Image (cartoon, grey):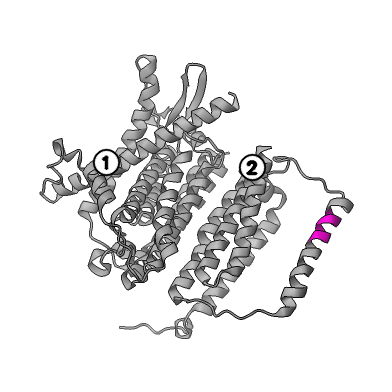
Amino acid sequence: MTLGTFILVSLVKILLALFVLLTAVAYTVWLERKVVGHIQNRWGPTRVGPFGLLQPMADGVKFLFKEDLTPPHVYRPLYIAAPMIAVVFALTSIAVIPFGNWIAIGSIYTPLQIADVNIGLLIILGITSLGVYGVALSGWSSNSKYSLLGGLRASAQMVSYEIALGLSLVGVVILSGSLSLREIVDAQAGHFWGFIPNWNIFRGGQFVAFFIYLMAAYAETNRIPFDLPEAETELVAGYHTEYSAMKFAMFFMAEYANMITVACLASIMFLGGWRGPVFGPEILQDVLPIFWFLLRVFVFLFVYIWVRGTLPRFRYDQLMAFGWKCLLPLAIANLVITALVVALRA
Amino acid sequence: MLHLILFSVFGLICAAAAVNLLVQSHPINSALSLVVVMGSLAVEYLLLGAEFVAAVQVIVYAGAIMVLFVFVIMLLNAGKDERTKGSRVSLFIGIPGVTIGSVLMAWVLITHSGTRSVEAGALPGDPRQIAQLLFHQFLLPFEVTSILVLIAIMGAVVLAARPEALQPTEEKN
């Protein structure tokens, strides 16, 4: 592939991935309002379009045309930069996520992934660890008690749970022997005992790690039951109390984009990525893996929303004790046992 | 060629952020400049073919240590520093001295040492190669370092704990 076609193909992939991601973000918000509505015996959005399907567009227009207030007591440069930092880092991590196999369009043969790098997992962990700045800086620069408390809570919580999150993924890395997300998915091909797929959650015995990841991910993305940084009953809205219009919407987008990244990573690391039954004509063989991948992401997002509709919020000391005294030792134990098993088998 | 351009651009960003770190009067701006320094250093490592070190640089320095810096500044709610005029000596002797010293050092290194610039990717940078080195050739130093870090962590806990928390407590009813 020449440099020209490489740049062209990459640009097309970037635009496509961003378009799909932003649409998915908008419709995850719709899904959340709809599902939580039904859980609470309400209808959710119904007025704009069939089943309220055009609601995200109406929301977007509303955010764009609302007055963009900047309170007088804020530290302006960081107040403006914080939502940008949050949304940029939330959207960047999609760059290394693989959606499916290699496909051929004409003479161009390319993977369904923006950049296939050999340290994909580390890049995602690095980018998510930088996402803390958006939340922390917005809390500080707003110059308000609620925002500051929310920002402090968020940064403490994200730094703490990042450790359990990272350790829960190391078991999978040991099993696959690679940090490349594509190779991790490839290592999960095939079946055992005739019908059970070789996913890490079954074959590798990583189900403990999967649940550690699940809980740490909820805390990382500041979702119920760990949404202490924006606990409405205590902190008004936490770190984005002083934000309005599009700046507020950017925090919202960042949160949902992070949810989607976390869901993608869960399906890649534990649930076999895009593996699934593939049949039919050539075009269907190209599309089916993407469908299986999106199905897993959808299920994961649905569980996210389901949990939000079901569980109450923790206290902050419970959150910290749970992270450090329960999740972290469990993750370390899982790591040691996985390493022992792999070493004894070799 | 593209490598060289990118390397110079990020080198300049790194140096500019480092200068900005010193010039800024507000601690949070300085801390954020340091984050930019760490980030552009990571890009430089990446361009030199040290992918693993680059990723670790971002995760550990930019993503964890600097977050703690920012966290502390937020918690203490540190305000603007008072400006002093600065000393004349540092302005007229210090800055030219540092400039001349570093230029001399670079010149000596380039002309008189046997080292040539290394091709990108010639040294181990792949996570697999680094793991091989760490867990085979350098296993003992690696483990000794981790014990050292463990001791440091325990020391930090002892220093940070309130005195009464360290006393053996009696069982309360």
Which residue range is magenta in the image? B103-109
Q: Position of residue A68 (x, y in %)?
A: 30, 57
Label 2: which secondary element: loop
**Residue A74 location, x and y as percent?**
38, 68
Quarter placement of the C terminus of chain A: top right
The secondary structure that dominates the magenta segment is helix
Q: Residue at x 60, y 69 (%)?
A: B23
Q: Is residue B23 left or right of residue A315?
A: right
Q: Quadrant of the N terminus of chain A?
A: top right
x then y, percent, for residue A332: 48, 56
- Where B23 falls versus A180 (above or below)? below
For this view, does B101 lie left or right of residue A141? right
**In this picture, is A274 found above or below B67?**
above
Crowdedness near tag 2: few (<14), some (14–19) or many (≥20) residues, C-alpha within 10 Å = some
Label 2 marks a residue whose chain is B
Across and down, in percent, residue A159 comes to 45, 61
The residue depicted at 55 percent of the width and 42 percent of the height is A119
- Same-chain status of marks 2 and 1: no
Q: Is residue A63 above or below residue A3?
A: below
Q: Mark 1 is on which residue type? A: Tyr
Q: Is residue B106 magenta?
A: yes
Residue under label 2: B126
Q: Disc 2 to disc 1, how far (Cα)?
A: 39 Å
- The residue that label 1 is drawn on is A27
Q: Is residue B77 visible?
A: yes
**Label 1 chain ID:** A
What amino acid type should be assigned to the residue bearing mark 2?
Asp
Residue at screen point 54% across, 41% down: A179
Q: Is B91 above or below relative to A24?
A: below
Marks 1 and 2: in contact by CB < 8 Å? no
Q: Quadrant of residue B150?
A: bottom right
